[in-house]
Amino acid sequence: MTANGGKIREQVLALLARKDYRPLTRTDIARELGLTGPQRNAVRKTLRELERAGVIARIRKDRYVLPAEADLVTGKLSIHQVGYGFLASETPGQPDIFIAAENTGTAMNGDRVVVRISRDAPYDRIKGRREGRVIRILERAHDTIVGTLQRSRNFYYVVPDDPRFVHDIYVRGDTDKDLPTRASLGDKVVVRLEAWESRHVNPEGEIIEVLGPATAPGIDMLSIIRKFHLPADFPKDVLDQAERIPDKISPRQLEGREDLRKEFIVTIDPDDARDFDDAIHVEKLANGGWNLGVHIADVAAYVEPGSALDREARRRGNSVYLPDRVIPMLPERLSNGVCSLNPEVDRLTHSAFIHFDKHGVARSARFARSVIRSAHRLTYKQAYAILNSAPRDQLDERLHTAWELASLFQK
């Protein structure tokens, strides 16, 4: 924001905070502040930014007020599948506001909205929460809906998969040639919402992607990916940064780390696992106690805060495991490569060491940055087979020892 823009912002907020202020339009605000010419454009921009930030609110007849003066609250709307919702206020310490289904307007789950608190609604109707009504949508969380393409006598429409979206969506155009080339009745499609002004009128939309027949193999998973807006491909700058990460650990990266490469450490994962992010080793002591080591891949050692990798990981939040695929939080170069605790290679880790007495009671614990070298990659089936047979080697013995300790926790 320019210095002049900052000054206008201060003037606008000071005006709206005056005790004798009455709601004014943009033009009236500029006139009240004595602003003319290019400064009027700056007022318009400032008001738009303040409204988007939730600092001010626009009410009837395009007049502006401070939210608290008009019982207005800005926040994120979460809608239950039966229709009602709750607003999480952006103001710290404010309780959630209950929104009845008939008061959500055209807002959808996740939208950033402005809600007017209902003064005549009983305060404790829903566990003491206030009630409100959505009066404006500041920002859509998403403008696409996944559903099944259907046709009535005169038009096409899409039945949404999400039960929280109760309106069928009319598809623009009323003939077959108006549809995308590959679209057929019964297909799963992605439709982008267009103008939707009233809850009492079905929204209209445009089909932007045809996923395929609803009953075809794999379409259900693809529908889930689109429905929850799960990211697929990584941006080029993220992939480029991942490719620049070296395969081998440098001497500098080992500084300050506890060297556990001689410990007998193993990973145990499902048969089809591709990334191994945790490993264990268990030792039984002469006094009957145990030492347990749990080792977690040190992903942060490779992801610099604020970098393209870091921003993308924060945006994704976590890896998503579907029956037929994984949508990773990090590129495969990291998730299945340098950050995966593969056997017979050095890997950077964070380790937790817990000492248990002979009764399985934890007596002490410590944590360390470490480097390990996994000795074996076991599957659950392999581990189960070992536990159901007599120990034959060091791997079998260590696994039986680990099971002895685990059995104490089940008592």
Image (cartoon, rainbow, N blue to C red):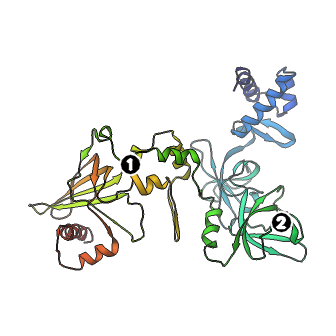
Residue at 70%, 23% in the rendered image: 2
Residue at 69%, 56% in the rendered image: 122
User: What amino acid is at disc 1?
Assistant: Asp
Residue at 44%, 52% in the rendered image: 334
> Quick check: 312 left or right of 347?
right
Picture layout, residue 358 above or below residue 18? below
Residue 81 % position (x, y): 66, 66
- Mark 1 or 2: in front is 1
Q: Could you say whether the residue bearing mark 1 is in a helix, strand or loop? A: loop
> Quick check: 392 left or right of 126?
left
Tell me the residue that label 2 is attached to. Answer: 171
The answer to which image quadrant residue 152 occupies is bottom right
Picture layout, residue 337 above or below residue 225? above
Residue at 72%, 40% in the rendered image: 52
Residue 34 % position (x, y): 85, 20
Q: How much space separates mark 1 and mark 2, taking CA atoms?
A: 51 Å
User: Front-most of 64 and 231?
Assistant: 231
Q: Could you say whether the residue bearing mark 2 is in a helix, strand or loop? A: strand
Picture layout, residue 356 above or below residue 69? below
Tell me the residue that label 1 is attached to. Answer: 247
Can the viewer see residue 299 in this picture?
yes
Q: Residues within 10 Å of mark 2 (few under 14, many from 20)?
A: many
Q: Which dot marks residue 96?
A: none
Position of the C terminus by quadrant = bottom left
User: Front-most of 366 and 93?
Assistant: 366
